[in-house]
Image (cartoon, grey):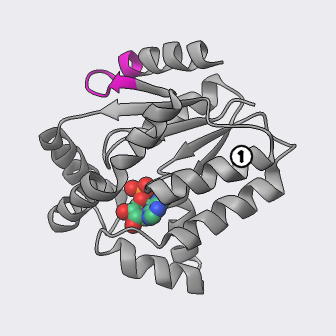
Amino acid sequence: MLNIVIFGPPGSGKGTQSENLIKEYKLAHISTGDLLRKEISTNTQLGALAKSHMDKGELVPDNVIIDMIDSYLDKNFGKIEGVIFDGFPRTVAQAEALKNLLVEYKTKVNVTLNLEVPNEELMARMIERGKTSGRSDDNPETIKARLDVYEKQTKPVLDFYKKEGVVANIKGVGSIEGIFADIKKAVDAAK
Ligand code: AMP
C-alpha cells in the first residue's frame, strides 16, 4: 500500500494537490473536512456537533475524527491500493491513533508531504476562496483562529512524523503544476 499524509496549514493547497495525486496515483482520498461538511449538509447529529466547532475555527474532538477514519478503513481496506489522508491527522493523538490503526492492517504512512506557505499568503488565499467556496469558516476572524489552532495543535504532528523519518518538505508557493512536480518526486521516492 501507498499511504500519504498531505499536511500543511489551512489554505496551503492540500485539497488542490490531493486532486492531482488522485489523478496520478490509484489512491483513495479521505478528507476529514469534506466528510464533516457532508454530515452538516445532511443535518446529522454528528454534523451539528462538528459545526459548533468548525464555525469557531476549532478542531472537532479527536474521538469523533478517529472513529470516522476507523470505520472508513474498516469498510474500504482490501478494495484500495492506498490512501491520501487530507486534513488528518491534525493532533498528535490522531497521528498515534492512525499509526495503531494502520499497524492492524500491516501498513503505515509512507510519506508526509509538508506544504510550506507563509502566513500572509495563506490569509490572502483563504479570503479569496471565501468569495466562492460558500464555506462559513473562510472569513477573516475564523481564518485567524484556524491558523492559531494549526500552530498550537497541528504543527506538533510534524515532529511526530519527523521522528518516523517520513517527512518531505514541499515549497507550497508558485504554480500548482510546479508544486505538484515536487510532490511527485517525493511520492515516487517513498514508494
Ligand atoms: P478543512 O476542510 O480540512 O480545512 O477542515 C475544516 C474544519 O473541519 C477544521 O477547521 C476543523 O474544525 C474540522 N476538521 C477537519 N479535519 C479535522 C481533524 N482531522 N481533526 C479535527 N477537526 C477537523
Figure quadrant of the N terminus = top right
| Residue labelled with disc 1 | 102
Residue 14 lies within the magenta run: no
Local crowd size for mark 1, using a 10 Å CA cut-off: few (<14), some (14–19), many (≥20): some
Side of 43 relative to 178 (left or right):
right
Side of 23 relative to 103 (left or right):
left
**Start-end of magenta stretch:** 169-179
Q: Is residue 43 visible?
A: no
Ligand 1 visible in quadrant = bottom left
Residue 179 position in % (x across, y down): 38, 21
What amino acid type should be assigned to the residue bearing mark 1?
Leu
Query: Residue placed at 47% from the left, 76% from the top?
Result: 50
Looking at the image, is 38 positioned above or below residue 1? below
Side of 164 relative to 174 (left or right):
right
Please identify the residue farthest to the left as the structure is shown: 120
Q: Which quadrant would residue 52 be assigned to in this image?
A: bottom left
Query: Residue placed at 50% from the left, 52% from the top?
Result: 89
Figure quadrant of the C terminus = top right
Residue closest to the eye, 130 or 28: 28
Query: Residue placed at 58% from the left, 87% from the top?
Result: 45
Residue closest to the eye, 121 or 92: 92
Side of 150 relative to 120 (left or right):
right
Residue 92 position in % (x across, y down): 46, 54
Please identify the residue farthest to the right as the structure is shown: 78
Query: Residue placed at 32% from the left, 40% from the top?
Result: 12
Q: Which type of secondary structure does the marked residue at label 1 adopt?
A: helix
Residue 130 position in % (x across, y down): 27, 57
Q: Can residue 3 be seen in this view?
A: yes
Residue closest to the eye, 136 or 31: 31
> Exactly how many numbered labels are in the figure?
1
Residue 61 position in % (x across, y down): 47, 73
Looking at the image, is 162 positioned above or below residue 11? above
